[in-house]
Image (cartoon, rainbow, N blue to C red):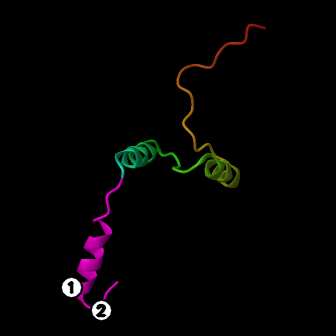
Amino acid sequence: MGRNKQERMAVYRALFKAHVDGKLIEDIRRAVNKGLELGNESFKDEVEVLYGRRVRQARMGRPVKSLI
């Protein structure tokens, strides 16, 4: 990242100068707090197949009873 301590510090600080959109920050926080994947639907499909686990939030509440 740099040849000396000053260069490394400057490069490291530059990593955090970029502005991240508020919606993206919310999405990241929600995914991290709930242990879910962050990505588009095809990415989530691939992760579910590869790891055999759900990566989307499940519906809240009890399952609907069948009328039959």
Q: Which residue appears at 63% of the width and 46% of the height?
A: 53
Kindly identify which residue carries mark 2: 3
Q: Badge 1: few (under 14), some or many (20 or more) residues near its Cα, within 10 Å? A: few
Kindly identify which residue carries mark 1: 6
Q: Position of residue 5 (x, y in %)?
A: 23, 86
Q: Which residue appears at 25% of the width and 72% of the height?
A: 13
Image check: 20 left or right of 53?
Answer: left
Q: Badge 2: few (under 14), some or many (20 or more) residues near its Cα, within 10 Å? A: few
**Does residue 26 show up magenta in the picture?**
no
The extreme bottom residue here reads 3
**Along the viewing direction, whichever of 19 and 47 lies nearer the viewer:** 19
Label pair 1/2, CB-CB below 8 angstroms: no
Image check: 9 left or right of 53?
Answer: left
Task: Give the magenta-colored segment's residue range.
Answer: 1-20
**Does residue 14 show up magenta in the picture?**
yes
Residue 30, compared with residue 51, is above or below; it is above
Q: Which residue appears at 29% of the width and 78% of the height?
A: 11
**Along the viewing direction, whichever of 20 and 49 lies nearer the viewer:** 20
- As drawn, the label of residue 24 is none
Secondary structure category for the residue under label 1: helix
Quarter residue 7 falls in: bottom left
Spatial CA distance of label 1 from label 2 is 8 Å
Residue 6, compared with residue 25, is above or below; it is below
Image check: 58 left or right of 49?
Answer: left
Q: Please name the amino acid that badge 1 sits on.
A: Gln
Q: Please name the amino acid that badge 2 sits on.
A: Arg
Q: Which residue appears at 53% of the width and 25% of the height?
A: 60
